[in-house]
Image (cartoon, rainbow, N blue to C red):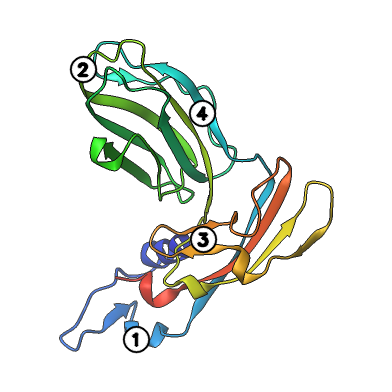
């Protein structure tokens, strides 16, 4: 929503240009980017009836012995924008690897993650994927015969707009699968302003059917470069 507003401003009005004083022109009026300090767009994102985190909900037992690159089958897309988990069920015949994940985030931006053996044999993305375009094992040392891998979903929910700081998330409400919505204490969630995610599992693991509503703000100063 924040980026859409700025895009419309730039499309519908004279294009922003800077003068020697570091100001920008919008039509015939000069404005300073600093004038947008302490001005925010406020957002509410709803995550209704979320599925519990599942270690093999995206792909189970992908055969790692196929000819490289191995394009993983994607059995299911994430139910909501959320991070992904991955783990080798076994790696007796894999000494090293390169794993590449590509997709779209909650804003529609293209995102990627790359993991190698230096990251271990199991892990999770810090980014939240709304959709997965591809999962590929692009390199492998060893035959991979008898080895398989699982992909699942985590508990980091991806926001549809930018955060400048963790404190920009100012309220989270949780509705239990069999109960009404209630305020979720700040100690029960963790905000990552770099990746625009909220980990809602700090207070309790997600149960199938839990819903979350997140209120936050986007700093207009950071939207206009």
User: Which is more N-terminal, label 4 or label 2?
Assistant: 4
Give how far across and how far down residue 86 sits, in percent: 42, 34
Disc 2: which residue: 142
Secondary structure of the residue carrying tag 2 is: loop
- Which is in the foreground here, disc 4 or disc 1? 4
Q: Residues within 10 Å of mark 3 (few under 14, many from 20)?
A: some
Q: Which residue lies at the image location 48% right of the left edge and 81% below the top edge? A: 39
In the picture shown, does residue 32 fall above or below 150? Answer: below
Secondary structure of the residue carrying tag 1 is: helix
User: Which is more N-terminal, label 1 or label 4?
Assistant: 1
- Relative to residue 48, is residue 165 drawn left or right? left
Q: Residues within 10 Å of mark 4 (few under 14, many from 20)?
A: many
Name the one closer to the observer, 97 or 71: 97
- Which is in the foreground here, disc 4 or disc 3? 4
Q: Which residue lies at the image location 52% right of the left edge and 45% below the top edge? A: 82
User: Which is more N-terminal, label 3 or label 1?
Assistant: 3
Disc 3: which residue: 1
Q: CA distance from mark 2 to mark 4?
A: 25 Å
Disc 1: which residue: 34
Disc 4: which residue: 58
Q: Which residue lies at the image location 29% right of the left edge and 70% below the top edge? A: 225
In the picture shown, does residue 180 fall above or below 163? Answer: above
Give how far across and how far down residue 26 sits, in percent: 34, 77
Q: CA distance from mark 1 to mark 3?
A: 21 Å
Give how far across and how far down residue 27 sits, in percent: 34, 77
Q: CA distance from mark 4 to mark 3?
A: 29 Å
Give how far across and how far down residue 191 sits, in percent: 50, 64
Q: Residues within 10 Å of mark 1 (few under 14, many from 20)?
A: few
Name the one closer to the observer, 187 or 179: 187
User: Which is more N-terminal, label 1 or label 2?
Assistant: 1
């Amino acid at each position: 929503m924040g980026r859409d507003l700025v895009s419309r401003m730039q499309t519908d009005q004279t294009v922003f240009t800077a003068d020697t004083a570091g100001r920008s022109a919008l039509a015939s009026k000069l404005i300073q980017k600093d004038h947008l300090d302490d001005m925010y767009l406020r957002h509410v994102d709803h995550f209704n009836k979320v599925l519990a985190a599942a270690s093999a909900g995206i792909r189970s037992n992908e055969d790692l012995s196929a000819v490289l690159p191995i394009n993983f089958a994607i059995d299911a897309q994430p139910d909501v924008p959320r991070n992904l988990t991955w783990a080798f069920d076994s790696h007796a015949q894999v000494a090293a690897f390169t794993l590449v994940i590509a997709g779209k985030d909650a804003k529609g931006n293209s995102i990627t993650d790359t993991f190698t053996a230096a990251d271990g044999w199991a892990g999770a993305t810090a980014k939240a994927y709304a959709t997965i375009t591809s999962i590929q094992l692009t390199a492998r040392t060893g035959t991979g015969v008898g080895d398989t891998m699982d992909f699942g979903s985590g508990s980091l929910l991806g926001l549809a707009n930018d955060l400048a700081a963790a404190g920009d998330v100012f309220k989270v409400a949780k509705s239990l699968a069999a109960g009404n919505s209630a305020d979720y204490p700040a100690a029960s969630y963790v905000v990552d302003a770099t990746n625009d995610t909220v980990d809602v599992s700090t207070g309790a693991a997600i149960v199938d059917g839990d819903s979350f509503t997140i209120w936050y703000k986007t700093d207009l100063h950071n939207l206009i470069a």
